[in-house]
Amino acid sequence: MSKLFTANTYIPTRVYFGVGVFEDLRAIELPGKKALICAGPLVKKLGIIKRTESLLSQNGVESVVYDRITPNPLRSSVMEAAGLAQDSGCDFVIGLGGGSNIDAAKAVAIVLAGGGDLWNYAQVGSGGKKYVEAALPVVAISTTAGTGTETDPYCVITNEETREKLDFAVDAIFPAISIIDPELTLTLSKEQTVFQGFDALFHAAECFITNENENRLVNLYAKEAIRTVKRWLPLAAQDGNNLEARCNMAYAANILSGYTQALTSCTSHHIIAQTMGGLYQQFPHGAALLAIAEQYYLKLRRLRPGLLDQLGTFMGVAHDSAKPGQGFVTALVNLMEETKVRGLAMSKYGARLEDAGKIAEITVDVVGIDFEKYRLTKQDVQEIVESSFC
């Protein structure tokens, strides 16, 4: 690492973290008096919506519920939820559940403050490129450990008409408050646990790569996140009731990896996976990332070998001077095999080999990957996708 470095930081979210902090919702100071709760069917089925409504009521806060958020949340759902919030006089938004629900809440907050259609505020693709001047306050209550949206200024929404899945990135949608209670993650299935755990790993690793050892805080958070996921993800997958493992995964995913994203950006690995999520609505984001990961980092070895070897050492794989850049690839394959997710069949989620060119075109020409300091070409992206099919 260079002796000259930065340590820029801005993470304004107030975080309540720990087993049992969900119950503190009855007493903490909230940013309004009437909340729209954005959630999905699973959270409703588990009874968490009812618990949330009760705790809010004890805190003197009214609430209305929109419980139709889906994985890879849709623009149409955001607009429906915003309409409900506006008609009900809500003055803040709660994202309750996983990353999709919290992301939808952030998007609703944009629409409620600025008016019009959400897609007016999308900055790439078919978006209207309108500046987001403000957003209603957002409270994130997390039931998963993966996306880091609890502590970052991003939401990702799919336009089902254009099949674009795009980032909305603006400081106004940093959650005002995030409640991260690892006890709420005990309901996650093994598959969800693993997919989300790798999402957290990739957030940290990608931000470390993008940072290129510049901002020391990014390196600090990323290194801690990667080491934590490496140690605790297999244990959480093996025994979903292991509360210590759940605590560590929530810490790594929702705080550390969120902090890295607040300070820099992910790489084209995430853009490719988001593109696939837009094209194939039932493709879980973590699964999409996993499906292309091995081939992506094999391709990246020639471009950033030193950074990949650093990442490998964080996961216990020593640098091999005869194979520059192989360290992270080896560590990644080891963890995939340990958690039994290596070689995911993309076709299981509706992906088609003949769409590889379209995925590359949307990734490079529509969303864009010009933010990267290295250059992957459209042909590189197509080759990554094609070689990932099995």
Image (cartoon, rainbow, N blue to C red):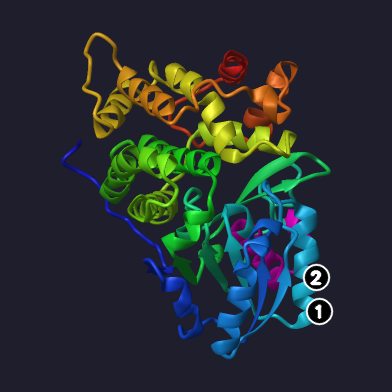
Provide the secondary structure element on which disc 1 rests.
helix
Q: Tell which of 354 and 364 is nearer to you.
A: 354
Answer above or below: position of 145 versus 197: below
Tell me the kind of residue under disc 1: Asp
Q: Is residue 351 left or right of residue 156?
A: right
Answer above or below: position of 94 versus 79: below
At a point 38% along the width and 29% down the height, the residue shown is 335
Tell me the kind of residue under disc 2: Gly
Q: Which mark is residue 87?
A: 1
Residue 369 visible somewhere in the drawing: no
Task: Rate crowding at label 2 as few (under 14), some (14 to 19) or many (20 or more) other CA atoms within 10 Å.
Answer: some
Answer above or below: position of 231 versus 144: above
Q: Which mark is residue 369?
A: none
Pointer 2 with pointer 1, Cβ within 8 A:
yes
At a point 66% along the width and 71% down the height, the residue shown is 37
Q: Residue furthest bottom?
A: 60
**Range of the magenta residues?**
102-120
Provide the secondary structure element on which disc 2 rests.
helix
Q: Is residue 143 left or right of residue 229?
A: right
At a point 31% along the width and 28% down the height, the residue shown is 307
Q: Quadrant of the C terminus?
A: top right
Can you give x and y, in whole percent of width and height, for residue 339 in the image? 43, 31
Q: Residue furthest top?
A: 322
At a point 52% along the width and 22% down the height, the residue shown is 376
Q: Quadrant of the N terminus?
A: top left
Q: Residue furthest left?
A: 3
- Mark 2, residue position: 83
Can you give x and y, in whole percent of width and height, for residue 271 in the image? 58, 35
